[in-house]
Image: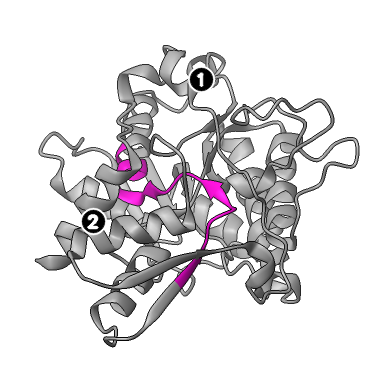
Amino acid sequence: MNILVTGADGQLGRCLKDVREHDKLARKEDVWFFANRHDIDIADKDCVTRYIENHGIGIVINCAAYTNVEKSETDVNAFRANSLGPLYLAQALKPRGGILIHISTDYVYRPFEGWNGAPFKEDEDCGTKGQLPLNSYGITKLMGEMAVKDNKGNYIIIRTSWLYSAYGNNFLKTVREKFLNAGIDETFRFVCDQVGTPTNAYNLASFIYSIVNKYSLRSISILEYVKFKSDVINYSDDGVCSWYDFAMEINDCLNKPNTIAPCYSHEYQTNVKRPAYSVMSKEKIKTDERYLPYVNTVHWKQGVRNVMKRLEI
């Protein structure tokens, strides 16, 4: 099976490469293509079609995305990457009977009429009855999901949240650097009224890799893929925290005497609305026999400590 990872230079793409390289039982017959934005522009339909056809791709793991939430409000490239890209990948795979594993976000969720305050399940009221995501980033990601579904090919959409790793730019690395270089009298303030779940990208990559291995054992044939069932699933580490809690855990790992204080969203200068609550239910992956054997979620604090230890090496 030929497998394409788009956005391979991002933190999830790089974690997938690590998982692949460290798997002693990796299937030799599977050929993995790790492509960055210079190799393939997913918002270019002809480019996508040529790449998938020329390389005989059977599975695409779409990690490519425009993730700058604030710039998404004005930059058309957010729509190109988050909405058009998934559509073109899905369209190119459909005639081949291939599978698109598309990475989405908790920001597609928004409290709706009748919501009881519980973690959001995959079948919640996303994008209907006027319950659009709060910001352009969430809207472009939801549009990408809807395009993939409407294409009616084979897909697994994975919604994740607050992704971080030892790679790239993310909250953990940025805050860690600030704490390490903090002055004696410096005070750091973090929002305490926005809650979700941080997710170690390596944990998500391991889960994705296991799912891919399950389906790469199949030959690409109509008979085999008749049994495939498209799905939308939530994946994050376990537990709930605020950005303030997240920052406190990072500092605890450093064992530094930094002064950290909570603040509220309205005190933080931004033009972007962010959800106060974006906790996702993981009930499906922990009960559905299709995913249960591959679930490797840990508490978010353990995930943070694992990455902090890696950054010390």
Image side of residue 12 versus residue 95, left or right:
left
Three-letter code, disc 2: Val
Residue 118 is situated, as x and y percent measured from the top left of the image, at 62, 27
Magenta span of residues: 189-206
In the rendered image of this protein, does residue 216 appear above or below residue 106?
A: above
User: Which of the two residues, 33 or 265, is positioned nearer the viewer here?
Assistant: 265
Mark 1, residue position = 284
Image quadrant in which the C terminus is located: bottom left
Image side of residue 15 versus residue 43, left or right:
left
Report if residue 54 is visible in the image: yes
What is the C-alpha distance between the residues marked 2 and 1? Answer: 26 Å
Around disc 1, counting alpha carbons within 10 Å, would you say few (fewer than 14), some (14 to 19), or many (20 or more)? some
Image quadrant in which the N terminus is located: top left
In the rendered image of this protein, does residue 176 appear above or below residue 195?
A: below
User: Which of the two residues, 30 or 232, is positioned nearer the viewer here?
Assistant: 232
Secondary element at tag 2: helix
In the rendered image of this protein, does residue 247 appear above or below residue 149?
A: below
Three-letter code, disc 1: Lys
User: Which of the two residues, 178 or 10, is positioned nearer the viewer here?
Assistant: 178
Secondary element at tag 1: helix
Which callout, 2 or 1, points at the residue further toward the start of the chain? 1
Around disc 2, counting alpha carbons within 10 Å, would you say few (fewer than 14), some (14 to 19), or many (20 or more)? many
Residue 178 is situated, as x and y percent measured from the top left of the image, at 33, 79
> Residue 307: which numbered mark, if any?
2
User: Which of the two residues, 210 or 100, is positioned nearer the viewer here?
Assistant: 210
